Image (spheres, grey):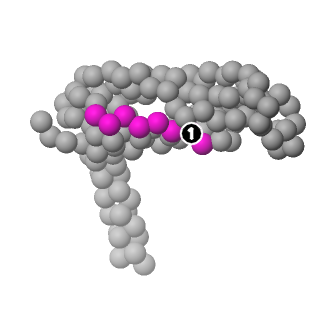
Amino acid sequence: MKILLAFLILAVLGGSIYYYIYDDSKETIEIIGSVHVSVNNSKYVNTVEIQDQPYFAVIQGVARNKSKETLKSVLIKYNIAGENTSTIIFDLAPGQQVSFVTKSVLISEKKPEYFLDTIQFEKTSL
């Protein structure tokens, strides 16, 4: 029993150290975005699926590289009113700030809730 408890403590400490050292996405990249909604006046929208006025929504924002390494293939995923959307930034140099816009999603709310889902990227040394 003591061996199992010691193993669990070591596993928790090891996992904590791993995330402290290697999972530095919050210190590496800063993402600031806000939702922008527009009315969809298209005749081709299936109104059976959407009961209210259909809207298009995108996230517009900026991504800033706070590290000293170049970031490649930065994938930014958001969720708007339960719909997933994303954008990709191919190269982000150290200290560089880039504007982005996600793919549009069709929603039924004029003021939807949204949140940053995930950020994925590859680091390359200078």
Q: Quadrant of residue 6?
A: bottom left
Where does the C terminus fall, quadrant-wise? top left
Residue 85 covered by magenta stretch:
yes
- Residue placed under numbered mark 1 in the picture: 85
The residue nearer to you, when weighing 61 against 47, is 47
Is residue 33 in sight in this rendering?
no
Range of magenta residues: 84-91
Residue 54 covered by magenta stretch:
no
Question: Horizontally, is 109 left or right of 35 in the view?
Answer: right
Across and down, in percent, residue 1 comes to 42, 78
Residue drawn at the location 77% of the way across and 37% of the way down: 45
Across and down, in percent, residue 24 comes to 32, 40
Q: Amino acid at mark 1?
A: Thr
SS for tag 1? strand
Is residue 66 in sight in this rendering?
yes
Residue drawn at the location 68% of the way across and 29% of the way down: 56
Residue drawn at the location 59% of the way across and 28% of the way down: 58
Q: Main secondary structure of the magenta part?
A: strand
- Decide: few, some or many residues near mark 1? Use Cα within 10 Å; few <14, some 14-19, many ≥20: many
The residue nearer to you, when weighing 18 against 74, is 74
Across and down, in percent, residue 54 comes to 78, 30
Across and down, in percent, residue 67 comes to 24, 31
Figure label count: 1
